[in-house]
Image (cartoon, rainbow, N blue to C red):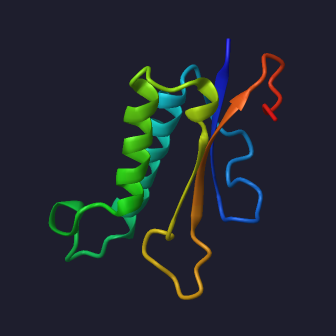
């Protein structure tokens, strides 16, 4: 049975979490990443801003869309994996952004090629 790894990293760098979480479905992994991004954006808002007034970024929508698509049952395992890249919440000058990735794992825990 496949398992899915959910990672966040700056493009070109190792993942931020030393032990990234794994999930039984790609949809769960994408939903986890969407929820993490929402928390990051909530934390980045100033005292006068909030998700209620400003809204969430396109990156959150892309992650949610991937979760819904993976849960639809209309995709193969290899189609449910991939990467969504968005700006770092709060924005920074010369920002490389963040890559949100779902990867399929082999039964022995290694990444599928």
Q: Residue at x 46, y 48 (%)?
A: 36
Image coords of residue 33 (percent x, y): 49, 44
Q: Relative to 107, does residue 98 appear above or below in the rendering? A: below
Q: Relative to 20, does residue 87 appear above or below in the rendering? A: below
Image coords of residue 68 (percent x, y): 37, 33
Q: Residue at x 82, y 35 (%)?
A: 113
Q: Specify the quadrant of the image occupied by residue 53.
A: bottom left
- Indicate left or right for 110 with 75 as reference: right
Q: Residue at x 49, y 38 (%)?
A: 30
- Indicate left or right for 73 with 95 as reference: left
| Front-most of residues 104 and 76 | 76
Q: Specify the quadrant of the image occupied by residue 40.
A: bottom left
Image coords of residue 81 (percent x, y): 60, 37
| The N terminus - image quarter | top right
| Front-most of residues 42 and 25 | 25
Residue pushed farthest left?
53
Q: Residue at x 64, y 30 (%)?
A: 78
């Amino acid at each position: 049975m496949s398992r899915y790894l959910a990672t966040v990293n700056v493009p070109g760098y190792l993942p931020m979490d030393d032990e990234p979480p794994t999930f039984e479905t790609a949809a769960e992994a994408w939903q986890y990443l969407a929820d993490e991004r929402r928390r990051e954006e909530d934390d980045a808002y100033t005292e006068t801003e909030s998700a209620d007034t400003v809204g969430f970024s396109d990156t959150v929508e892309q992650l949610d869309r991937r979760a819904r698509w993976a849960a639809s049952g209309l995709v193969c395992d290899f189609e449910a994996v991939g990467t969504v890249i968005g700006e770092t919440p709060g924005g920074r000058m010369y920002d490389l952004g963040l890559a949100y990735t779902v990867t399929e794992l082999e039964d022995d825990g290694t990444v599928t090629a």
